[in-house]
Image (cartoon, grey):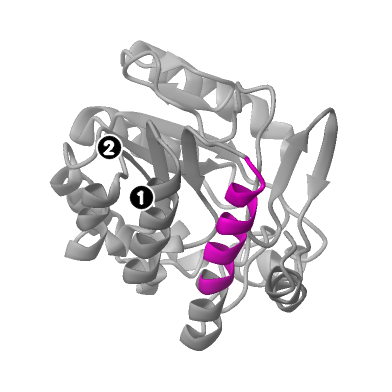
Amino acid sequence: MLCPFCSFHRVLFREDSASHYFDCLRKEIDTVSDAGYSFGELYVGGGTPTVLPDKLARLLDCVQKRHSLTSVSVETNPDDLEKDSVRHLRDHGVNRLSVGVQSFDDDLLRQMQRLEKYGSGDMIARRLVHSAGVFDTLNVDMIFNFPRQSEASLNRDLRILTKEIGVDQVSWYPLMSASSTRRPMRQHMGGDVDRSRERALYQMIASHMLDAGYQRSSAWCFSRQPGLIDEYIVEHDEYVGLGSGSFSYLQGQLFASTFSINHYCALVGAGQTG
């Protein structure tokens, strides 16, 4: 199932097509490495790259063999935290895990169609506590300003993160909508985004996080310690994005890889990049 609010590049999971995609991604990594590019950091983002953990581990090994990485960050979903396969990613060089939680409010999780998939807010909180210390950095992605989110609900989310769990890093993003998500959001989440209260909710978040001892790494990212990476901030002069829908910035130009997975695999199969 696809979350009704998400407008990122994503498709429904099919194991055969996902396996083929991982194979193509490894080939693109080889193509770019053979062209002379060298990497010190790796960020594996998207919806759920841990959906095929063995494939992901092989992909990480592919990069590690050719590049000296000091930082490897991977995204995952809450239900994967208890799986040994995700913890084994640490053995393949992963030192930062980013978990898409969004909220601990069961009513909101139900509206997002995440309650049945990933469990209740209490279950997710227990998994996060159980995962503390497994990776150097445990980041939690949260969303605020849902149509039916109250200030009391947001305050509870803040309290759980900072007092009950004490995660290393929290990234707070305002709910965003696109033309492709407006209809499912109205159908499942009770309406469109009300931007008139976004600033007040953000100020509530920032005040609480700073009072709890977190430092603001960027507008949306709060960390317990300085130096923790922010997954959407790139401090290098250039970067390369691999995979369908990725972006690269090279020699003053921004490049986008094709958003068609079939086209992407065809390009990579012909020895090109996306």
Residue 218 rendering spot, x and y as whole percentages: 56, 20
The one of 44 and 79 positioned closer to us in this rendering: 44
Residues at badges 1 and 2 in contact (C-beta under 8 Å)?
yes
Q: Is residue 31 left or right of residue 57?
A: right
Q: Amino acid at mark 2?
A: Ile
Residue 202 rendering spot, x and y as whole percentages: 57, 26
Q: Residue at x 14, y 48 (%)?
A: 130
Q: Residues within 10 Å of mark 2 (few under 14, many from 20)?
A: some
In the image, residue 128 sits, relative to residue 245, either above or below, namely above
Q: Which residues are magenta?
A: 23-36
Residue 272 rendering spot, x and y as whole percentages: 75, 63
| Residue 102 seen by the camera | no
Magenta stretch: includes residue 29: yes
Q: Is residue 158 left or right of residue 244?
A: left
| Residue 95 seen by the camera | yes
Q: Residue at x 48, y 79 (%)?
A: 19
Q: Secondary structure at mark 1?
A: loop
Q: Amino acid at mark 1?
A: Phe
Q: Quadrant of residue 27?
A: bottom right
The alpha-carbon separation of the residues under discs 1 and 2 comes to 8 Å
Q: Quadrant of the C terminus?
A: bottom right
Q: Residue at x 36, y 74 (%)?
A: 116
What residue does disc 2 label?
Answer: 160
